[in-house]
Image (tube, rainbow, N blue to C red):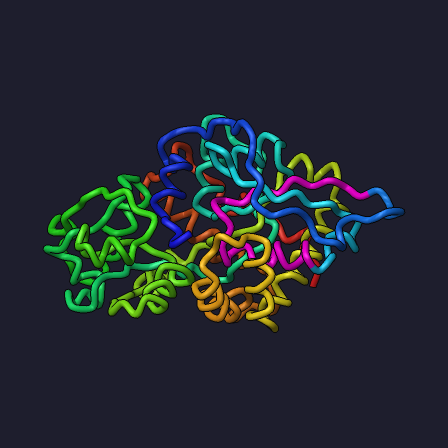
Amino acid sequence: MNSISRRQFLAASGLALGSVALAGCGTSASKGGSASDSGAGSAAKTKITFCLDYTPNTNHTGIYVAKEKGYYADEGIDIDIVQPAEDTAEAMIGSGQAQLGVSYQDYIANALASDNPLPIQAVAAIIQHNTSGIMSRKEDGITSAKHMEDHVYDTWNMPVEQATIKDVVEADGGDYSKVKMVSVSTDDEVTSLKNKQFDCVWVYEGWAVQNAIVQDFAYNYFSFISIDDKLDFYTPVLAANNDFCKKSPDVVKAFVRATKKGYEYAVKDPDGAAQILCDAVPELDSKLVRQSQSYLKDQYVADAKSWGVIDKDRWATYFKWLNDNKLVNNQLDVNSGWTMDYLEA
């Protein structure tokens, strides 16, 4: 695996384009289970199907650590990690095919604003701040959003994405109409930039930018939150099915508790955590995983008091921005879609 494409995330979710269809089934996202998860004479455990948002990567390291280290088993949980087969994690969580999984604040917004809202909510922040932005070739001098003028931007043709680009370009004093749009199918932004398929692209700093470093590719990068605080939304989050939360609150608390330990381990021992992820998913590029893990160790908690905390004002600000820009099918309750009831201090 080379890179994680935000295009593929949003194209799959159909953000602001309609309701989310129910998923069929997930595909396995790990190579077997931990020795701590099974064994003769072990007590019966609660089975949890956990759906990733995409293929396994360092956003998910804490999940794999908690599984391998037996943190879930210690809480009486048997976790099965799957990937969405065709639709989204939100569809699987909302339908109850997965009880918990990985989502994003903007995806949850879409699920809630649908004509047929899904029963899904964030129960913890996996990464504390939005670590995405625009990457380009260093030689092109695109050091801020204004410099995207007269350059080719790789779009996935989604209203929320293009509205975000318009927002940051104009906030920087640029003319959005001068940004040239193309749509290129790529799962490796660095290679596509090298081949000059486009000049700039929306990426995650924790993966694509680290991939550029690993490949010794000369790049420029600026983050969205450096331009507009409204864009500091939660990406990604730990999400859960509302009905499951009501039915089994103690199981959700136990799951979040074990997951928190997994991410705290990744903060303290990023190299060890990276090895656990690579062992579970050997097709990953181990050098990139370690580079990415080194970066993310400071992002999982960042300036929050502890892992998982969601700031209500920051959450509401982004939902209001979506409402104001008419990027959701129906107006959102800006305080909906999240809870801290299952995260223990």
- In the depicted view, which residue is nearer to us: 321 or 303? 303
Q: Is residue 257 left or right of residue 319?
A: right
Q: Is residue 140 left or right of residue 13?
A: left
Instruction: Please determine whether, in this image, residue 82 is positioned above or below residue 265.
Output: above
- In the depicted view, which residue is nearer to us: 219 or 321? 219
From this viewpoint, which residue is outermost toward the bottom? 268
Instruction: Please determine whether, in this image, residue 280 is positioned above or below residue 45.
Output: below
Instruction: Please determine whether, in this image, residue 83 is positioned above or below residue 73.
Output: above
- In the depicted view, which residue is nearer to us: 231 or 238? 238
Q: Quadrant of the C terminus?
A: bottom right
Q: Position of residue 230 (x, y in %)?
A: 38, 57
Q: Is residue 97 left or right of residue 151?
A: right
- Is residue 227 visible to the viewer in this orientation of the structure? yes
Residue 168: say if magenta.
no
- The answer to which quarter of the image holds residue 336 is top right
Q: Which residues are magenta?
A: 45-68
Q: Position of residue 273 (x, y in %)?
A: 59, 65
The residue located at (49%, 71%) in the rendering is 294
- In the depicted view, which residue is nearer to us: 238 or 226? 238
The residue located at (74%, 54%) in the rendering is 35
The residue located at (13%, 55%) in the rendering is 151
